[in-house]
């Protein structure tokens, strides 16, 4: 079956709160997660150290499960009591993603941003004939991005991304388990996969500033499908190319701005999930206090048809983002929602 | 002050909108009849144990000509779920009795399989109408799997092996019941013959036992089809290390598959052993008919069960 959630190599709480719109976004500290062409708007920014950014994305179902695991680990209740709790978890994706971006450096229009991300998903389906599936995806690498303005209206940017990926997944049904019980010789690789490889990704982005308050963006992420240079053969699943377009319009009242954004991701529908799920809409209301970006604000968006939102605040030494968003884990929009919380914390020094 | 109020007011509105809103704005334009969407809809309905919705979507899929391994497996899950035969509940029930049966201390994989099958007792299948419904579900599910578009798919084979094993456990009990009932009827027939009476006068009870045995034999054919298809834990071609179900299937097949084209010869110690099989009884059993089984044909009929399994320890 083709139902699956949208793959994101690096996710962002800020993008999540505004419907995962980012293609035509203004320059921010998360430019390399978005359109590298925005680096051309460096302006007065000469040097910036982003000492540490920590992002956490957790599914609402996973919160309860983690509590159950903690309770079992503390010894309250038997193993069977713990197993029985899973009877209520059929059809509820357990999701946890953690991201660490340490020691990023921005020098005018160039940025180097190391990262490590780990995403874990666990699914339990069909209590009648139980099926268990999990995946654990760890990617560590560095985004090396540069942008250049072309005239007054255009900017082009590129991100080169060497990375290492380790991908584990498993898919087991009840009939597989009883088959394993009777077999004297079996190959676990039929059910479990553990593959690691070095890879290289390339993003190319363009921004057209139609007016001072309206712009269009084009972004090609993982050009030609990010391939693997060495490691296990076959390697982890390929990271598919994603061609996206987006637009942004701003309305200002004094120092406060209201941004409207819309993206159509994956124009070629390489993820094969239908175009409806690729339409993202967002709005952000905020203002700048210390930086070139909005430092305080609220955001609302439509992400795969679900209403999402969040807020952010920069208190100079620390920036905090929080969002409640949704991921579609079914095939059609609205079929199987996994509501999630995202939290981001970042500390930067800008010269 | 006013801007602070506006900010907190907006924040509360955002929180309320987001957290309270499970609706999807695009769902009204999504194509609910897309086969992939229907398949996913069946899975979601089964996760919720909503069998009416699951059945409706499966019928929509098959009505549009979409039949695949995925559809068959989901159909089987729906059959089992509708009858209340929920493998998750069985698993929990098995583990709850595991300490008593020593499942947790199984020393070999076969110990584990044997104990798993031994755990499938009346409490799992139920009694009366519930039991009948669940046996029907197992039977229908096996037929759906054998008739699947890709019967050699590993998932189809694995599921049919599992369900065949689950079906076999109560089936052996039912077979013994039918054979005992037939044997009792034959004993009465023998008494009637010895007393000079008409054994064909009232064969109602015997015919009922023959019918039950025939039904059991048909179910056994499903088990045998799975057991000879290359299951890891239900494989009658093994010569050693057989689990309890494999042992029983093999013993039954060896002892009972002796044909029904004619009555067996009587031993010297009991030369009149076939007196209990007057012509009317032979007709009721189908002995010598054109459709009767041959010896060693790999199939067991109700007739063979009654002819060769009446002696205790012979087949079970």
Image (spheres, rainbow, N blue to C red):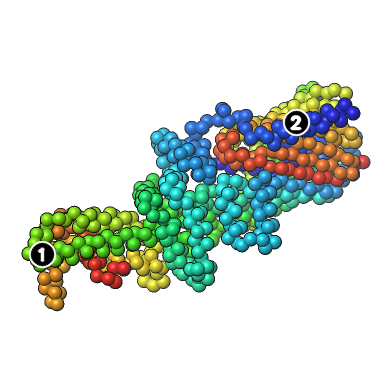
Please tell me which residue lies in front, A286 or B69: A286
Classify A240 as above or below B134: above
For this orientation, the residue located farthest to the bottom is B269
In this rendering, would B176 be left or right of A349? left
Mark seen at residue B193 = 1
Bin the neighbour count of mark 1 within 10 Å (Cα to Cα): few under 14, some 14-19, many 20 and up.
some
Q: Chain of mark 2?
A: B
Residue B170 in sight from this viewpoint: yes
Image point 37% across, 66% down: which residue? B246
Q: Chain of mark 1?
A: B
* Chain-order first, disc 2 or disc 1: 2
For this orientation, the residue located farthest to the right is A351
Quadrant in which the C terminus of chain A appears: top right
Image x and y of residue A290, in percent: 90, 36
Q: Which residue is mark 2?
A: B13
Image x and y of residue B291, in percent: 18, 54
Image x and y of residue A209, in percent: 78, 26
Q: CA distance from mark 2 to mark 1?
A: 92 Å
Please tell me which residue lies in front, A86 or A250: A86
Bin the neighbour count of mark 2 within 10 Å (Cα to Cα): few under 14, some 14-19, many 20 and up.
few
In this rendering, would A155 be left or right of B140? right
Classify B169 as above or below A104: below
For this orientation, the residue located farthest to the left is B196
Image point 75% across, 31% down: which residue? B13
Image x and y of residue A200, in percent: 69, 48
- Judged by depth in the image, the label closer to the viewer, 2 or 1, is 1
Image point 14% across, 70% down: which residue? B273
Image point 79% across, 26% down: which residue? A258
Name the image quarter holding residue B201: bottom left
């Amino acid at each position: 079956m083709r139902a699956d959630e949208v793959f994101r190599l690096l996710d962002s709480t800020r993008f999540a709160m505004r419907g995962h719109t980012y293609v035509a976004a203004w320059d921010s500290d998360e430019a390399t997660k978005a359109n590298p062409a925005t680096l051309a708007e460096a302006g007065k920014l000469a040097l910036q150290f982003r000492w540490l950014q920590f992002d956490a994305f957790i599914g609402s179902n996973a919160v309860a499960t983690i509590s159950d695991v903690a309770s079992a680990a503390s010894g309250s209740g038997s193993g069977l009591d713990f197993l029985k709790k899973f009877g209520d978890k059929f059809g509820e994706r357990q999701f946890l993603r953690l991201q660490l971006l340490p020691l990023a450096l921005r020098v005018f229009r160039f940025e180097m941003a190391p990262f490590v991300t780990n995403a874990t998903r666990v699914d339990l389906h069909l209590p009648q004939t139980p099926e268990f599936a999990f995946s654990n995806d760890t990617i560590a690498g560095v985004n090396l991005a540069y942008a250049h303005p072309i005239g007054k209206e255009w900017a082009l940017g590129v991100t080169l991304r060497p990375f290492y990926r380790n991908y584990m997944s498993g898919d087991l049904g009840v009939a597989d388990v009883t088959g394993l019980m009777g077999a004297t010789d079996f190959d676990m690789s039929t059910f479990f996969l553990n593959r690691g490889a070095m890879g290289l990704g390339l993003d190319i982005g363009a921004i057209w500033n139609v007016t001072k308050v309206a712009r269009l963006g084009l972004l090609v992420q993982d050009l030609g499908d990010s391939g693997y240079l060495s490691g296990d053969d076959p390697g982890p699943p390929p990271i598919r190319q994603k061609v996206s377009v987006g637009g942004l319009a701003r309305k200002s009242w004094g120092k406060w701005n209201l941004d409207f954004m819309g993206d159509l991701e994956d124009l070629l529908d390489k993820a094969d999930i239908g175009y409806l799920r690729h339409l993202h809409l967002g709005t952000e209301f905020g203002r700048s206090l210390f930086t070139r970006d909005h430092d305080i604000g609220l955001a609302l968006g439509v992400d795969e048809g679900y209403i999402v939102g969040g807020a952010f605040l920069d208190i100079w030494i620390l920036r905090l983002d929080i969002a409640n968003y949704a991921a579609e884990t079914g095939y059609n929009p609205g079929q199987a929602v996994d509501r999630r919380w995202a939290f981001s914390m970042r500390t930067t020094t800008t010269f | 002050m006013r801007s602070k109020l506006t900010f907190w007011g907006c924040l509360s509105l955002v929180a309320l909108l987001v957290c309270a809103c499970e609706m999807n704005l695009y769902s009204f334009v999504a194509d609910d009849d897309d086969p992939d969407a229907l398949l996913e809809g069946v899975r979601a309905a089964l996760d919720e144990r909503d069998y009416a919705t699951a059945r409706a979507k499966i019928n929509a899929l098959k009505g549009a000509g979409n039949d695949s391994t995925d559809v068959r497996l989901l159909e089987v899950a729906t059959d089992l779920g509708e009858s209340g035969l929920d493998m998750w509940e069985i698993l929990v029930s098995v583990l709850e009795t595991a300490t008593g049966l020593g499942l947790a201390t199984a020393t070999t994989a076969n110990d584990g399989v044997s104990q798993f099958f031994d755990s499938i007792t009346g409490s799992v299948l139920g009694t009366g109408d519930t039991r009948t419904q669940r046996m029907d579900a197992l039977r229908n599910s096996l037929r759906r799997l054998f008739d699947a578009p890709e019967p050699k798919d590993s998932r189809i084979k694995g599921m049919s092996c599992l369900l065949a094993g689950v079906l076999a456990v109560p089936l052996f009990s039912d077979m013994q019941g039918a054979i005992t009932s037939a044997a009792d009827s034959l004993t009465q027939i023998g008494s009637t013959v010895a007393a000079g009476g008409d054994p064909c006068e009232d064969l109602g009870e015997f015919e009922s036992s023959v019918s039950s045995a025939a039904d059991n034999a048909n179910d056994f054919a499903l088990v045998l089809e799975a057991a000879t298809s290359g299951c890891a834990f239900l494989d009658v071609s093994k010569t050693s290390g057989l689990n309890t179900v494999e042992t029983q299937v093999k013993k039954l097949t060896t002892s009972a598959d002796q044909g029904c084209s004619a009555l067996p010869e009587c031993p010297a110690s009991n030369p009149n052993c076939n007196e209990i099989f007057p012509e009317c009884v032979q007709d009721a059993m189908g002995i010598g008919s054109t459709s009767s089984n041959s010896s060693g044909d790999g199939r067991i009929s109700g007739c063979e069960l009654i002819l060769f399994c009446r002696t205790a320890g012979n087949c079970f």
